[in-house]
């Protein structure tokens, strides 16, 4: 399986193999979902050996996209309220120069503020990669505000004559929406 670099919290770099079974099963699950999907997992789940950390990461699976199609290593995390096909507003974190919108609840489940960074395990058609993005209290607050706006507009779904939600005015075309997410972490207690 492909080697991936992981930067430990104390600044060391580990070159580790991605867990082939994890990659295969996650890719298959996403294909079954029929839409780009994200998962929240323990860092150790994505590697073929145990990594001594309690840090979680968000796995973003884009099985139809080659890695060169977006600049996924670009660091800024922005926020936006987007609307699902059903008309439900969803707070999103915008990654990859605002080309990938990820449900902000997935970031919340990953608890990046505990570690001062958001770790994303990207799964593309042609490769996997691990990236770390700075995550501060300011980032957390901006995403919380976007979540508050989305929650405040949940009852304001506009439907057209066919019962479908009207298209969002000003929605960005070309943005890959990863609104479905699954949390796959062990809880204690």
Image (cartoon, helix red, strand yellow):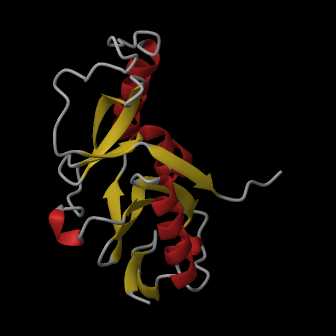
Q: Residue furthest front?
A: 162
Q: Quadrant of residue 81?
A: top left
Which residue is at the front of the view, 168 or 164?
164
Q: Tell me: residue 51, above or below residue 176.
A: below
- Residue 139 in the image: state x and y as whole percent: 34, 39
Quadrant in which the N terminus is drawn:
bottom left
Residue 116 can be seen in this image = no
Residue 5 can be seen in this image = yes
Q: Quadrant of residue 84?
A: top left
* Residue in the image at 39% along x and 74% along y: 11
* Residue in the image at 34% along x and 67% along y: 131
Report the side of 55 relative to 2 (left or right): right
* Residue in the image at 42% along x and 42% along y: 179
Q: How many marks?
A: 0
Q: Residue furthest right?
A: 189
* Residue in the image at 51% along x and 68% along y: 28
Report the side of 133 relative to 14 (left or right): left
- Residue 104 in the image: state x and y as whole percent: 43, 39
Which residue is at the front of the view, 186 or 23?
23
- Residue 99 in the image: state x and y as whole percent: 21, 49
Which residue is at the front of the view, 63 or 163?
163
- Residue 43 in the image: state x and y as whole percent: 54, 69
Q: Tell me: residue 184, above or below residue 16.
A: above
């Amino acid at each position: 399986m492909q080697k991936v670099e992981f930067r430990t919290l104390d600044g060391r770099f580990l070159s580790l193999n991605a867990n082939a079974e994890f990659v295969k099963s996650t890719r298959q699950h996403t294909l079954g979902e029929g839409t780009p999907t994200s998962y929240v997992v323990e860092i150790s789940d994505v590697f073929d050996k145990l990594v001594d950390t309690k840090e979680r990461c968000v796995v973003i699976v884009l099985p139809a996209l080659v890695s060169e199609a977006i600049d996924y290593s670009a660091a800024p995390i922005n926020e936006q309220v987007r609307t699902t096909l059903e008309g439900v507003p969803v707070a999103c974190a915008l990654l990859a120069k605002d080309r990938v919108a990820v449900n902000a609840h997935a970031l919340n489940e990953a608890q990046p503020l505990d570690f001062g960074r958001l770790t994303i395990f990207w799964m593309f058609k042609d490769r996997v990669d691990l990236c770390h993005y700075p995550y501060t209290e300011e980032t957390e607050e901006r995403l919380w505000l976007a979540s508050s706006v989305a929650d405040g507009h949940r009852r304001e779904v506009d439907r057209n004559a066919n019962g479908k939600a009207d298209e969002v005015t000003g929605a960005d075309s070309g943005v890959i929406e990863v609104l479905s997410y699954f949390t796959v972490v062990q809880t204690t207690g």
